[in-house]
Image: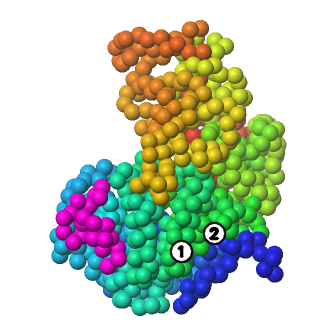
Amino acid sequence: MTPQSVPYPHLLNPLDLGFTTLPNRVLMGSMHTGLEDGRKHFPAMAAFFAERARGGVGLMVTGGFAPNIAGWTKPFAGMLASSGAARRHREVTDAVHAEGGRIALQILHTGRYGYHPFCVAPSRIQSPISPFTPRELSARGIERQIRAFVRCALLAREAGYDGVEIMGSEGYLINQFLATHTNQRRDDWGGSYENRMRLPVEIVRRVREAVGPDFILIYRLSMIDLIPDGSSWPEAVALAKAVTQAGATILNTGIGWHEARVPTIATSVPRGAFASVTQTMRRALRDAGLTIPLVASNRINTPEVAEQVLADGCADLVSLARPLLADPEFVRKAAAGRPQAINTCIACNQACLDHAFKAQLATCLVNPRAARETVLVQRPARQRRRVAVVGAGPAGLAAACTLAERGHAVDLFDSAAEIGGQFNLARRVPGKEEFSETLRYFGQRLQSAGVVLHLNTRATAGLLVAGDYDRVLLATGVTPRDPKIPGQDLPHVLSYLDVLLQRKPVGDKVAVIGAGGIGFDVAEFLVTPPGASPTMHLSEWRAEWGVADPAEVRGGVVPPRPAAPARQVVLLQRKTGKLGKGLGKTTGWIHRAALQMKQVEMIGGVNYERITPQGLFVTHGEKRLDGQLIECDTVVLCAGQVPLRELLEPLRASGVATDLIGGADEANELDAKRAIDQGTRIALALE
């Protein structure tokens, strides 16, 4: 292949680090999967990274390992502090090297973010995201932390790692020393910025002295804190220069503290939203004569976006973290000119970050094999079976593709004119356009696997019985639950299907009944001006969330300036308490904040008494007190779903082996994570 024919010439260009050369510009960013937190998980972690090394990733970084107990993320979390632990890591590094890959270990000290009573910090200031108040480090205690970082780096080299990443961003310990927000010391480790940046500079300098010149040392630097009183831009540049001169090999971009109230990696964040920050830093370092490679990060999820970031001179490498959960073959497919075959990360956070913050093993909604490679093994079927899958939503698509790839003969039926099921609702919601990528991926996968697709076909029991299938999987999904509210048959009452799929006219004042995931999605859809760009322009998004140029505003955050809502919306639920409580742990706050900025009124603990031409009449509490008419032009019903199982009994009565998957099995919300996982697992188990 000639250089001119390389599909992504910047992305696939090797990078010479002097003592070693990376085969391309893809760095797999650190993700805490939970595999780090117990020696029993090391075989799974070895398989996880080996598969991505086999997929062509240039350099991988592990999830964070604490250098000591004080740095734990939680009690007994992953830690590298002894030669015995280093020997156990050999299973991981050997597996990666056997596939021709390179891997660095991230050294993560959580500081006041630690979810345990032994946490420490520069000052005794509790984090808003942890119930534990940290102990203020003494000068001797700071020295112990530095030595712990150095020891951890030496042990990483002993364990066979190709390098380490020192986590200096996202509001963890090192970041806490840098910001006056969290460092109120008056000794040599506080006060002036020169003092506050002593910790990272000392750590990098001593680690480099200890490990020698031929070991990759990545420093993760917070280039925009997104908190009030965060670092200024001159301070960030000064630190970048100092850690480069202290011996860093690569500077990785950190975006925002965990306590920041700005979304940084959710699906509503525009692609490559923060690449310009890395570009500005890169220019500043080049102007100072420093040519250290910089990594751009956050919401870079396709080869096209990655290539553009590099071609524009924003960075020298790109960090792909969750995109490599979604598809370990990302680099290999890009190199083969097959981007349409990539299973794109949709930045939903539902199976990765949400799991991590609930102390569960992380995986991926669109790829349930992620971090389950030793359990969900896809092998050829022992015997070719004829299988019918009814319903081309997430569960049916996952099952049909996996079955066909294993060698089974698969017919996939759907009464709609296109595949997708409930994903066709999600992708119409502003900020969730990425869901279209999953349908593009499944469409390509259906074709390459040889699934026979029957659209616009309502599968009946007679048709399926006559087909003489060995097995039928019913992925028929859900139907809206009937809330049985007097007056719901009035013409100004619509279902969420009417609004999102049928695009029926909606008035200026709307009451949305039901505040689950669909209710929030419908409310977001309704407050967005009609005809708005499907994907919010970057400048609009920055204004919406108050993101500023860190070179102009300390911390890069200003008061939000959201656009005016298209409609006046009231969102209601029967349950008392906070609306959206069941939404994702790491994204629920984003949805609530977005609606609050659009002036959506949220009311809980109501009883839906009746709908009238004037609006919705409700009462409050068990005693049905304080009757209230919510005046509105339109009422939208988002009151839950029930499974569609009408084919189950006729098929089983006819002796057809039949299984329920996805919403047809369980209609609690619209859980694509469970649906895709269930469809994949049942397809892997069928012999």
Residue lying at 55% horizontally and 23% vertically, measured from the top left: 568
Q: Tell me which numbered mark, 2 or 1, is placed earlier along the sequence.
A: 1
Image x and y of residue 8, in percent: 73, 71
Residue sitting at the far front: 287
Q: What sort of colour scheme is used for the picture?
A: rainbow
User: Is 669 placed above or below 396 here?
Assistant: above
The residue under label 1 is 287
Residue 103 can be seen in this image: no
Tell me, yes or no, whether the highlighted magenta stretch contains residue 492: no
Q: Nearer the viewer, residue 169 or 495?
A: 169
User: Is 626 placed above or below 455 here?
Assistant: above
Q: Quadrant of residue 511?
A: top right
Residue lying at 42% horizontally and 82% vertically, measured from the top left: 245
Residue lying at 73% horizontally and 63% vertically, measured from the top left: 339
Mark nearest the camera among 2 and 1 is 1
The residue under label 2 is 313
For the N terminus, the image quarter is bottom right
Residue lying at 64% horizontally and 12% vertically, measured from the top left: 490
271 displayed left or right of 470: left
261 displayed left or right of 475: left
Q: Nearer the viewer, residue 244 or 39?
A: 244
Tell me, yes or no, whether the highlighted magenta stretch contains residue 188: yes
Query: Mark 2: few, some, or many residues within 10 Å (few <14, many ≥20)?
Result: some
The stretch in magenta equals 180-202
Q: Amino acid at mark 1?
A: Asp
Image x and y of residue 88, in percent: 40, 81
Secondary element at image label 1: helix
